[in-house]
Image: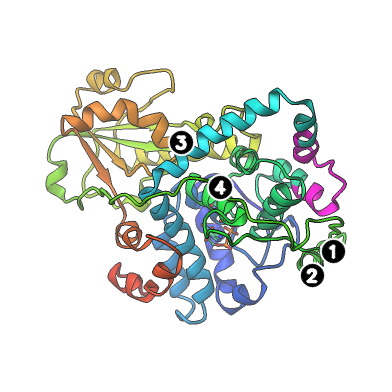
Amino acid sequence: MDLTPSREAALARLATFLPAAGRRYAETRNADDGPAVGGRGNVSQLSPWLHAGVIGESEVLEAVLSVHSPRAAEKFIAEVFWRIYFKGYLEQRPAIWDDYCSGRDGALAAMEANAGLRKAYTEAVEGRTGIEAFDVWAKELVETGYLHNHARMWFASIWIFTLKLDWRLGADVFLRHLMDADAASNTLSWRWVAGLHTKGKHYLARADNIARYTSGRPGGALAAAGLAGDEAEPLSEPQDYARRKLDLPPPVSAADFAQPFALLLHDEAAHHAPLALPATPALLIGAARPEARSPAAPGPHALTFARGALAGGMAEAAAAFGCPAVEWRASEPLAPLLAAAGVERVALPYLPTGWTRDALWPDLAPLAAEGRVTSLLGDIDRATWPLAKAGFFGVAKAIDGLLAECGIRGDG
Ligand SMILES: Cc1cc2nc3c(=O)[nH]c(=O)nc-3n(C[C@H](O)[C@H](O)[C@H](O)COP(=O)(O)OP(=O)(O)OC[C@H]3O[C@@H](n4cnc5c(N)ncnc54)[C@H](O)[C@@H]3O)c2cc1C
């Protein structure tokens, strides 16, 4: 499958997948048939481009509804809203991300000090546990930068409940290798499997379920002997994450862009097309921070996708706007780049909780305090995030209304 990190490749993948986004998706999406040369037929594999902001959720939903009725595409639409829900949930509980980062660092240090733990961890990440299914996915993750959703659930469950490894180490392995690695979807999905997101409700992988949904793999169903049984207890934690009030930037208008401004593209918003910018920037700034996701190095697929998406997005934005483009490197301060171009103001796609924000915000905060930063937040996030207060149900029951509110009808 063509996983080129370009908008052209994202649109081509969307077009190829569209016929399957209706009932076929609902009926077949749970099967992990393995990485086929032409791509998996039953899922979209759009997640790397969605994460990088090369294509937007709204345009994917618009395209799907132009081919399928809302009922036929109900399942696919709901999955796209899971992504938006997780973002909104984490935005209201950023301490979950901070605690994940410090917990991961503590778990990495504990492993360095314990040879037994280090051995178990190394066997898991290198796919040498002896549990066939898990070992296949561990290798597939590194070799392809992608895992099917069901495989992610089984993998995380086996990691936590059978191998009894720290969930934050597993989440870190995913973040380093997945091309779609996303602070919200990844952290909260691992917590969901562990029984920390929906307290006391964990996800236990079962060998018969794995065999059933992997039977379409070229080599046949994957075996998973010796998994933790039903008696495995969900994880628990002492802290309760209170919800903080969302502090969203106001909607923008052309008046906000009356003065010359720089458009800042970053890892999670690498292309200008989904932004619907109402004015032309005087300068483009590109900031790639894929290494900020983990203290350890990102895997080759994740790194190549992230860097390629931003490089391609910058080149296309420079051509579209006819303005100069500069790279903001990780070791450099931002202010001199603006000063050199004689630009005072910065517009940037909203930085959600996660490593991109952690890496970029310290330089942007002083400018924001001076009123020189305009954050762009898409309609669908603005409408959905306030509903991501607790479980997904609060969003699920509002999906029809959210689509209508955002003008997503399939006639665009
Ligand atoms: C332990 C674990 C870790 C995960 N880590 C990530 C991650 O780092 N980044 C990430 O984007 N997704 C993550 N997911 C969610 C999901 O597995 C992927 O989004 C999905 O597999 C991507 O493949 P696809 O594009 O073919 O999805 P499709 O089935 O085609 O779905 C379409 C889109 O909907 C969204 N989506 C689908 N399922 C989910 C879901 N369960 N949660 C959130 N969004 C969803 C994705 O943006 C996806 O591209 C994780 C799930 C688990 C269980």
Part of the protein shown in magenta: 121-137
Judging by the rendered image, the residue that carries numbered circle 4 is: 180
Height in image: 404 above or below 298? Answer: below
SS for dot 4: loop
Query: Which residue position holds label 3?
Result: 355
Give me the residue at 78% from left, 60% from top. 229
Q: How far apart are marks 2 and 1 (CA)?
A: 7 Å
Looking at the image, is mark 4 or mark 3 earlier in the sequence? Answer: 4
Q: Is residue 257 visible?
A: yes
The image quadrant where one finds ligand 1 is: bottom right
**Would you identify the image quadrant in which residue 305 lies?**
top right
Which residue is painted at 39% across and 69% down in the image? 394
Say which amino acid is labelled 3. Answer: Trp
Q: Residues within 10 Å of mark 3 (few under 14, many from 20)?
A: many
Q: Can residue 293 be seen in this view?
A: no
Q: Is residue 112 left or right of residue 259?
A: right
Give coordinates of residue 38: x percent, y percent.
70, 58
* Magenta-colored stretch includes residue 348: no
Quarter holding the C terminus is bottom left
- Kind of residue at disc 1: Ala
Q: Which of marks 2 and 4 is in front?
A: 2
Q: Name the residue under label 2.
A: 212
Amino acid beneath label 4: Asp
Mark 3, secondary structure of its residue: helix
Q: How crowded is mark 2: few (under 14 residues within 10 Å), some or many (20 or more)?
A: some
Circle 1/circle 4 CB separation < 8 Å? no
Per the rendering, the mark at residue 221 is 1
Query: Please, is residue 76 above or below residue 140 in the view?
Result: below
